[in-house]
């Protein structure tokens, strides 16, 4: 990573590239850490906050809350994305991290259902909605800040959006392995599941401090001086950039689907493969390591050889291998095979993920980039992210086939290939 970026602040001082990337990535890391631990510990969260005579119903309620929180993300995208395009990337990023901190704090302090009754699941839902609203504005603002500070290395810079997700996955998985190995089932269900959320709270103050010391995007400042702020309104996006929003949704489908399936792996391993609680966490830990290594590599080389050169083959490979890999893991039913399958998916996801954020950024002009990116990303994540664990559980339930989640991954892959081809042919993005 270079020491400085070519853009400068309004005072003429050079900006350290690592400061820009860290400031933009820390909130995304916080968001994905919280998403990961909620999905990983949904089996235990369901007991504390969603009690039912049926274990399967409890888990479905917990995963349903996980899914519902994603459908407020487009609202956050519109509100916070427009705020970022009107008032600046920095104020929007500061607000999102405060809101994510509040939602996580509510989960940490929430009494269980046997103490406060129906208020428990309702307040957990509220906490997840607050986090979802905040996350709705995070991706667009953070990605805009990076690609606008580092225009000549936008593929590498924006790849850290997803590399930070890998870091969060590793941390959440390490904590998951430690807790499921050292705590009893009763301890996990009563208080142990709160510990990873407490760890997540520590990120908030650190993120706020880092973001305070990074300047506003020079590209955003220049555009705002030349063009009226009304162009950043959601009406402008829907009038003039509808195709770009649809393409952004399609582009992110397969990577988001894979990402959220991997967060569902601990529950999948326990409920459908009969493995121990720690088995799925080992698989997700390997996934985090693979993504941490390969995502920035893909981001680095895509700036040299072309971003779609990485993305199209990766998406096609996902479609070609999904059914084979699911069949293998179900037939053999061994932790080693589960880990290999997750690692293969993670390598393909890294090749697609690395260039993705910068490609999505190039779909939109600067004056509406925050709003457009946030809206396209979060609608895609709501459909192919928040629904993935729930759809996976539902498909298994109605078919009785542990391979059934493959159908959902195949659909997402087909949509992404179609969207990327249109981006290439119609918009000329390479």
Image: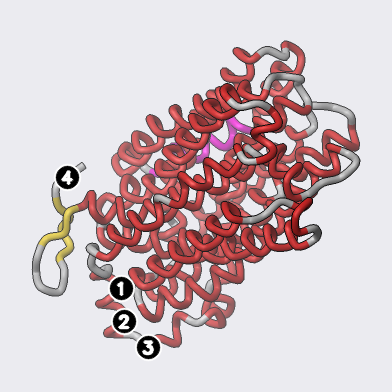
Determine the residue positioned at 55% across, 23% down: 282
Residue 283 visible, this angle: no
Q: Position of residue 249 (x, y in %)?
A: 59, 57
Q: Position of residue 38 (x, y in %)?
A: 61, 45
Q: How many C-alpha atoms fall within 10 Å of the one at disc 1: few (<14), some, or many (≥20)?
A: many
Determine the residue positioned at 63% across, 58% down: 128
Q: Which mark is residue 220?
A: 1
Distance between mark 2 and mark 3 Cα atoms? 7 Å
Instruction: Answer whether labels 1 and 2 touch (C-beta < 8 Å).
Output: yes
Image quarter (top left, top right, bottom left or bottom right) of the N terminus = top left
Q: Is residue 310 magenta?
A: yes
| 416 over 275 or under it: above or below | below
- Given residues 62 and 350, the one toward you in this image is 62
Colour treatment of the image: secondary structure
Secondary element under disc 4, as helix, strand or loop, is loop
Instruction: Answer whether labels 4 and 2 touch (C-beta < 8 Å).
Output: no
Choose the circle earlier in sequence order: 1 or 3.
Answer: 1
Prevailing secondary structure of the magenta residues: helix
Distance between mark 1 and mark 2 Cα atoms? 6 Å
| 179 over 160 or under it: above or below | above
Residue 268 visible, this angle: yes
Q: Position of residue 322 (x, y in %)?
A: 67, 28
| 386 over 370 or under it: above or below | above
Q: Which mark is residue 224?
A: 2
Q: How many C-alpha atoms fall within 10 Å of the one at disc 2: few (<14), some, or many (≥20)?
A: some
Secondary element under disc 1, as helix, strand or loop, is helix
- Given residues 414 and 273, the one toward you in this image is 273
- In the displayed structure image, the side of residue 354 where residue 320 appears, left or right: right
Range covered by the magenta-colored residues = 307-318
Q: Which residue is mark 3?
A: 228
């Amino acid at each position: 990573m270079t020491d400085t970026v070519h853009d400068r602040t309004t005072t003429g001082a050079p900006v350290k590239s690592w400061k820009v990337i860290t400031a933009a990535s820390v909130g995304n890391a916080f968001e994905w850490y919280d998403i990961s631990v909620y999905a990983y510990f949904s089996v235990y969260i369901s007991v504390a906050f969603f009690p039912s005579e049926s274990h399967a119903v409890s888990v479905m309620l917990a995963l349903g809350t996980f899914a519902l929180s994603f459908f407020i993300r487009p609202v956050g995208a519109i509100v916070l994305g427009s705020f970022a395009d009107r008032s600046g990337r920095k104020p929007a990023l500061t607000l999102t991290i405060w809101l994510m901190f509040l939602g996580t704090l509510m989960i940490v302090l929430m009494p269980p259902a046997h103490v406060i009754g129906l208020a428990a699941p309702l307040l957990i839902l509220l906490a997840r909605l607050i986090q979802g609203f905040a996350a709705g504005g995070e991706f667009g603002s953070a990605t805009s800040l990076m690609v606008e500070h580092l225009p000549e290395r936008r593929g590498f810079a924006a790849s850290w959006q997803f590399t930070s997700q890998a870091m969060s996955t590793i941390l959440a998985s390490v904590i998951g392995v430690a807790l499921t190995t050292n705590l009893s089932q009763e301890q996990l269900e009563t208080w142990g599941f709160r510990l990873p959320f407490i760890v997540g709270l520590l990120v908030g103050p650190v993120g706020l401090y880092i973001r305070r010391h990074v300047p506003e995007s020079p590209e955003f400042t220049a555009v705002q001086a030349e063009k009226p702020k009304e162009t950043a309104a959601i009406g402008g996006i829907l009038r003039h950039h509808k195709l770009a929003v649809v393409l952004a949704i399609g582009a992110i489908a397969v990577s988001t689907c894979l990402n959220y399936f991997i967060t569902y792996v601990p529950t999948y391993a326990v409920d459908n493969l009969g493995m121990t609680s720690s088995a799925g966490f080992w698989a997700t830990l390997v996934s985090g390591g693979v993504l941490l290594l390969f995502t920035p590599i893909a981001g680095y080389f895509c700036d040299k050889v072309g971003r779609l050169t990485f993305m199209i083959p990766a998406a096609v490979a996902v479609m070609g291998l999904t059914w084979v890999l699911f069949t293998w893991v179900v037939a053999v039913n061994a932790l080693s095979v589960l880990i290999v399958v997750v690692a293969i998916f993670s390598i393909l996801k890294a090749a697609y993920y690395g260039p993705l954020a910068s490609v999505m950024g190039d779909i939109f002009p600067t004056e509406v980039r925050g709003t457009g990116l946030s809206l396209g990303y979060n609608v895609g994540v709501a459909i192919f992210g928040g629904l993935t664990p729930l759809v996976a559980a539902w498909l298994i339930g109605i078919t009785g086939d542990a391979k059934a989640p493959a159908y959902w991954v195949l659909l997402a892959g087909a949509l992404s290939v179609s969207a990327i081809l249109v981006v290439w042919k119609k918009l000329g993005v390479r």
